């Protein structure tokens, strides 16, 4: 089975722009979670989607949003980019998002905001 | 919110030796799950080992084992017979059994393996 894939792998944007990141989960996985990883804050949970619905949300401003499609692929959008949004964005997938399941992470998208 | 603390930003170990990475967490919940993830320089996070809080027996996976002390809220990872491929950033993570699929991660420990 193919693993979790994320596109693009690298992205450079300027302040004020918006960006969309994509995540394709492992085939059959319906839960997709997003995390922001920075040297200062470590890994922080953004949100989780399951069956096209946001099921959990972390403590991030409304500029961060996401969605999930019927094929379980997920996108994350950040509007009005700030310098502090520079980070590695990881997505993870699991079958149902249940506690007994393993989450599988993608390689991440590295976003640089100038 | 739950917090996870890894007090060792960096650790090193000689090849074939044993190393222990520390993790403590703060929670008022009784049921939860703990994980150790490995993130090699290629950046893909990989699950190393998991522990269910209701299980008293410490989890083991080949050369990796944990020391889970629920009362002390401690969850350390022991790597035996360290190999060069074990060099990576190691993250301790917490998942509640009540609040859904949301993980809380520590800040990580960078492990260097010395040949």
Image: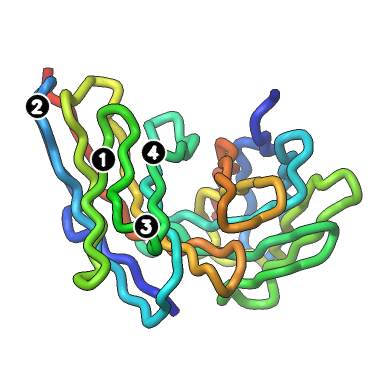
Protein chain holding label 4:
B
Mark earlier in primary sequence (2, 3): 2
Pointer 1 or 2: first along the chain: 2
Q: Mark 2 touching mark 3, by CB under 8 A?
A: no
Mark found first going from the N terminus, 3 or 4:
4
Give the residue at mark 2.
B17
Q: Residue at x 82, y 47 (%)?
A: A72
Give me the residue at 62% from left, 62% from top.
A15
Q: Is residue A42 visible?
A: no
The answer to which quarter of the image holds residue B60 is top left
Whichever of callouts 2 and 4 sits on the residue coming sooner in the sequence is 2
- Do tags 3 and 4 sit on the same chain? yes
Which residue matches tag 4? B48
Seen in the image, is B79 located left or right of residue B106? Answer: left
**At numbered mark 2, what does the secondary structure look like: helix, strand or loop?**
loop
Q: Is residue B53 visible?
A: yes
């Amino acid at each position: 089975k193919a693993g979790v894939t994320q596109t693009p792998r690298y992205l450079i944007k300027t302040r004020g722009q918006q960006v969309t990141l994509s995540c394709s989960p492992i085939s059959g996985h319906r839960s997709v979670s997003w995390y922001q990883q920075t040297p200062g804050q470590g890994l922080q949970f953004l949100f989780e989607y399951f069956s096209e619905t946001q099921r959990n949300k972390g403590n991030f401003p409304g500029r961060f949003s996401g969605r999930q499609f019927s094929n379980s692929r997920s996108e994350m959008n950040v509007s009005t980019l700030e310098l502090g949004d520079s980070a590695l964005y990881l997505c993870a997938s699991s079958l149902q998002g249940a506690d007994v399941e393993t989450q599988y992470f993608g390689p991440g998208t590295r976003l640089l905001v100038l | 919110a739950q917090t996870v603390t890894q007090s060792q930003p960096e650790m090193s170990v000689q090849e074939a030796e044993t190393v222990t990475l520390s993790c403590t967490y703060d929670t008022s919940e009784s049921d939860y799950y703990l994980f150790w993830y490995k993130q090699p320089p290629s950046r893909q996070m990989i699950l190393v080992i998991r522990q269910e809080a209701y299980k008293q027996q410490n989890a083991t996976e080949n050369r990796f084992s944990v020391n889970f002390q629920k009362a002390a809220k401690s969850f350390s990872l022991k790597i035996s017979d360290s190999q060069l491929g074990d060099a990576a950033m190691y993250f301790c993570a917490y998942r509640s059994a009540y609040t859904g699929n949301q993980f809380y991660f520590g800040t990580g420990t960078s492990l260097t393996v010395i040949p």
